[in-house]
Image: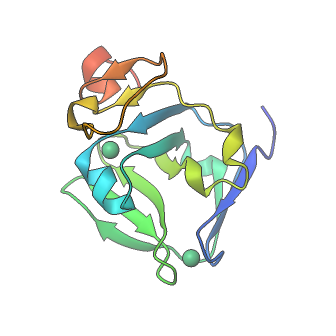
Amino acid sequence: MADNWQEGRCLCGAIRFRLAAPPKWTALCHCESCRRSASAPIVAWMGFDPEHVTWTGERSFYKSSEIATRGFCGRCGSQISFESTRWPGEIHLYAACLDDPEAYAPQLHCHTGERLSWLHISDDLPQFPASAELDQGAQP
Ligand SMILES: [Zn+2]
Ligand SMILES: [Zn+2]
């Protein structure tokens, strides 16, 4: 594992993060909550230990559900992080924020039960109708 896997930022650059290690898991999420918060049909997620993420700049926070808190840039509005009591000791970041998003490799699709009908999946990655954790008892 590299000491400095990658860095990332919001649209305006007021918030930056540095990642000390590659993601523990990656997933493409089709759920409505991700879709609405990102204003995008799908979100490419990465999961990290919070101690592997070093922040520059102050995140703003929105509690999107009883268990979920979404971090964003108060200046440009970019979504930047997701934390949930369902996955304690873990922080989820958006692959699209990476300085080099091409370095990202998705492992699976989750919440495909909420997938938009006009978004067609043509890869061979596993698909889970809900979260992968609920469907197989593993990572989200
Ligand atoms: Zn910003
Ligand atoms: Zn989601």
- Vertically, is 22 above or below 92? above
* Image quadrant where one finds the N terminus: top right
Task: Look at 59% across and 71% down and name the residue there.
Answer: 11
Q: Is residue 136 visible?
A: yes
On the image, the x and y values in percent for residue 134 come to: 25, 24
Task: Look at 35% across and 38% down and name the residue there.
Answer: 119
Left or right: 28 in relation to 63: right
Q: Nearer the viewer, residue 38 or 70?
A: 38
Res 126 → quadrant: top left
* Furthest residue toward left: 66
Q: Is residue 140 visible?
A: no
- Vertically, is 43 above or below 121? below
Left or right: 109 in relation to 98: left
Please tell me how many numbered marks the rendered image carries. 0
* Image quadrant where one finds the C terminus: top left
Task: Look at 67% across and 58% down and name the residue there.
Answer: 8
Task: Look at 74% across and 49% down and name the residue there.
Answer: 6
The quarter of the image that holds ligand 2 is top left
On the image, the x and y values in percent for residue 71 come to: 43, 65
Left or right: 101 in relation to 31: right
Coloured how? rainbow
- Vertically, is 94 above or below 135? below
